[in-house]
Image (cartoon, rainbow, N blue to C red):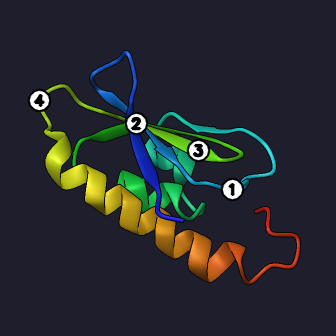
Amino acid sequence: MPIQVQPTPNPNAMKFVLGRPVFARPLSFPSAQAAAGHVPAEEIFALSGVYNVFMVQDFVTVNKLPDVPWEPLVPAVQAILAEYITSYVTSHESGVA
């Protein structure tokens, strides 16, 4: 199932719906330093303009700086999440990271 993208009331936040539970518990990363060592949060923070990542079982919310456009970020975040689900989550028996 492709990762669906949904707008939020905040124009600088976008919700990425994963279509299945991926994370066992909510994870909040307020900075790149906080995300260090956690794939895919670390990779999402590597994208220019991202300042917050929030993960809940079956979706991820990404916040960007106001002057950064969504056009390059959306496909990049989708690709990072799809790769994570394919390479990490499906390789673990529990299916939840």
Determine the CA span between mark 1 and mark 2: 16 Å
Against 88, is 54 above or below? Answer: above
Determine the CA span between mark 3 and mark 1: 8 Å
Which of the two residues, 41 or 95, is positioned nearer the viewer here? 95
Q: Is residue 96 left or right of residue 8?
A: right
Quadrant assignment for the N terminus: bottom right
Determine the CA span between mark 3 and mark 4: 24 Å
Disc with the residue nearer the chain's start (3 vs 1)? 1
Residue type, mark 4 in image: Asp
Q: Are marks 4 and 1 in contact (CB under 8 Å)?
A: no
Residue type, mark 3 in image: Phe
Against 9, is 96 above or below? Answer: below
Q: Which residue is mark 1?
A: 20
Which of the two residues, 84 or 41, is positioned nearer the viewer here? 84
Q: Which residue is mark 3?
A: 59
Badge 4 marks a residue whose secondary structure is loop
Determine the CA span between mark 4 and mark 1: 32 Å
Determine the CA span between mark 4 and mark 2: 20 Å
What residue appears at the point 42 percent right and 66 percent down from the top-left corner?
80
Q: Residues within 10 Å of mark 4 (few under 14, many from 20)?
A: few
Question: Mark 4 or 1, which is nearer the eye?
Answer: 1
Q: Is residue 36 left or right of residue 4?
A: right
Against 48, is 66 above or below? Answer: above
Q: Which residue is mark 2?
A: 6
Q: Are marks 4 and 2 in contact (CB under 8 Å)?
A: no
Q: Are marks 2 and 3 in contact (CB under 8 Å)?
A: no
Disc with the residue nearer the chain's start (1 vs 2)? 2
Question: Mark 4 or 2, which is nearer the eye?
Answer: 2
What residue appears at the point 76 percent right and 63 percent down from the top-left corner?
97
Could you tell me if residue 90 is visible in this image? yes
